[in-house]
Amino acid sequence: MKKSSGISDEDSALFRKSVGDAKPLKQDSFIADKPRPKAHPAKTEADNLAVIEEMSNADFDSSILERGDELIYTSPGVQNNILKKLRRGHYKIEAELDLHGMTVDSAKVALTDFLKQCTVRSQRCVRIIHGKGLGSINKKPVIKNKLNQWLQKMDIAQAFCSARPADGGTGAIYLLLKRK
């Protein structure tokens, strides 16, 4: 016995007339042509660039850090053992950027490009050489201070600290980037 579908004979006849000579498909599953591309965080990148631009145009206070001062920073929620491992050089350095000898503007551009490349390549730990300020006019670290300010304002930095003496000491930092 046939189950009652609740469709009247008149509606059924109208449907059959509309469908006409249509044949059912042999395959009933959908195959996507291409996987969808990952979302691009354009707003986040624009915000980071705006922060860098604002910081580079701000007045510079040379008394912030002296030549031998060590840099240490962790973003909120980062465990102490992560910073300890970073300071001891336990993370593999996956990329390096040398900023010393550059102007503030060229260092800012180089840093931005470098961090974009690191993000694309999913690199976590990098070394940035900023120098100790021996070549600056007043013998104080200009790029070091700017780098400290820039990285603390950017959302990409999980932690950073001055490198071990063998890797540049207070003239370089290890930077641990946040995972995507």
Image (cartoon, helix red, strand yellow):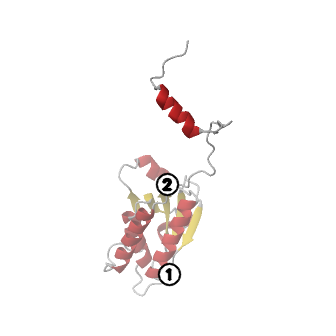
Q: Residue furthest right?
A: 26
The outermost residue toward the top is: 1
The answer to whether residue 106 is seen in the rendering is yes
The answer to whether residue 71 of the structure is visible from this angle is: no
Mark drawn on residue 86: 2
Q: Residue at x 32, y 76 (%)?
A: 63
* Residue lying farthest to the bottom in this orientation: 137
Q: Which residue is mark 1?
A: 102
Residue 145: x and y, percent?
A: 39, 73
What is the number of the mark on residue 25? none
Reply above or below: 136 against 80: below
Question: Gap in Å between the C-alphas at discs 2 and 1?
Answer: 26 Å
Element marked by disc 1? loop
Left or right placement of residue 134 versus residue 58 in this view: right
140 is higher (above) or lower (below) than 81: below
Mark earlier in primary sequence (2, 1): 2
Residue 154 percent coordinates (x, y): 40, 64
Q: Quadrant of residue 67?
A: bottom left
SS type, badge 2:
helix
| 81 or 149: nearer the viewer | 149
Q: Residues within 10 Å of mark 2 (few under 14, many from 20)?
A: many
Q: Residue at x 38, y 76 (%)?
A: 53
Indicate the amino acid at tag 2. Leu
- Residue beneath the point at 55% across and 53% down: 91
Between 122 and 87, the residue placed more toward the observer is 122
Q: Residues within 10 Å of mark 1 (few under 14, many from 20)?
A: some
Percent position of residue 21, x then y: 64, 39
Number of numbered labels in the structure image: 2
Note whether 28 is above or below 122 in the view shown: above
Location of the N terminus by quadrant is top right
Nearer the observer: mark 2 or 1; the answer is 1
> Please, what is the three-letter code of the amino acid marked with disc 1?
Met
